[in-house]
Structure formats: structure tokens, C-alpha cells
Image: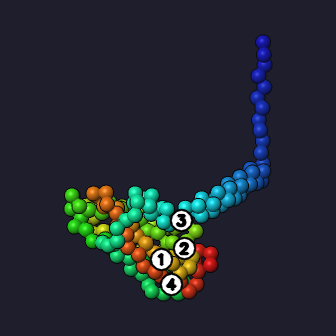
Amino acid sequence: MSVLKETRLALSRRQLLTAAGTGLVAAAGLSVMTARPAAAAASAEEMIAKIAGGTPKEGLVKVDGPEIAENGNTVPVTIEVESPMTADNYVKSVHVFADGNPSPEVAAFTFTPQSGKAFAKFRIRLAKTQNVRAVAMMSDGSSYVGSKEIKVTIGGCGG
């Protein structure tokens, strides 16, 4: 006949918080170390070619923003795509890229025919003077691109 002993693990509150904090710091450090090389590996050109399935055509996409952004931390950008937005012909999605940022894809929007208009107004963070490009994916599988150069006087993403 075997006797089972009940073993109780007793941790103080301080020990538990220390262990949890150490785990969080380790996880945060690991995510920072792995995020940078992955972002640097793919350029905006490669990402656009992958999303568009090749080189998108010029036209239909209008990117608007300031000529000069005094602060790269919060740059207002407007994207508009010319489309009838009918059940047969509409914009499925728009992907926005900032060529000079550490992580080039800065936004993505999804549309349906019920959207009525393919339009988005948002703010992005820019590291330096660069092109902001928007790639529109259409319902028929075609893709279009538009861009605008925005000059940044004070960097927002590390410079």
C-alpha cells in the first residue's frame, strides 16, 4: 500500500512578482531582437510586388499629405481610389507603404461595394523624407499604385 503525500509549493508574493517580471522582460527582449531583422529583410518594393502579384499600374490611386511634415511622429495622409464601387467593380483593399521606415507597410484598409467610396484619412509615423505609396487591389484582380513624397524635418521613427 502506497501513501501519497501532498506537497504544497509556497511562493511569496514578492517571489511570484519577480518571476512574472523576469518572464515579461525576457519576452519583450526576444520580440525586439526578432522584429528588427524580419522588418529590414523585406523592402517596400518586395512587399508591394508580393501583394500586387507583380508590378501595379500607375493611376486611380491618389495619395495626399503635406509637402513638408514638421514632425515625423504624426503625419496626416489621405488615400482615395477612383472606383464606381459596384458589385462588379470595386476596391477590395488598399495597402500603404512608407519606403524609408524600418517596417515599410504602415496601414491596410478593406473595402466592399457597400463602402460607397474607397477613401481613408489617417496619421502615420515617418522616419525621414520618403515616398508614401498606396497599392489598391481591385475586385477583378488588377492593382494600381499612387505615391507622394513627404519631406520630414524632425524624424519620428528613429531619425
Quadrant of the image occupied by residue 31: bottom right
Are the two marked residues, 1 and 2, in contact with CB atoms closer than 8 angstroms? yes
Kindly report which numbered mark, 3 or 4, lies closer to the viewer in this rendering.
Answer: 3
> N-terminal of the two: label 3 or label 2?
3
Which mark identifies residue 43? 3
Which mark identifies residue 131? 1
Residue 54 location (% of width, % of height): 40, 60
Would residue 83 be visible to someone looking at this image? yes
Please name whichever residue, 75 or 26, is drawn nearer the observer in this view of the structure.
75
The amino acid type found where label 1 is placed reads: Asn
The amino acid type found where label 2 is placed reads: Gly
Q: Residue at 76%, 22% (x, y): give it.
A: 4
Horizontal side of 87 relative to 3 (left or right) equals left
Are the two marked residues, 4 and 2, in contact with CB atoms closer than 8 angstroms? no
> N-terminal of the two: label 4 or label 2?
2
Which mark identifies residue 151? 4
Whole-number angstrom distance, CA of label 1 to CA of label 3: 13 Å
The amino acid type found where label 3 is placed reads: Ser
Crowding at dot 3, Cα within 10 Å, few <14 / some 14-19 / many 20+, comes out as some
The amino acid type found where label 4 is placed reads: Lys
Which residue does the numbered mark 2 point to in the structure image? Answer: 100
> N-terminal of the two: label 1 or label 3?
3
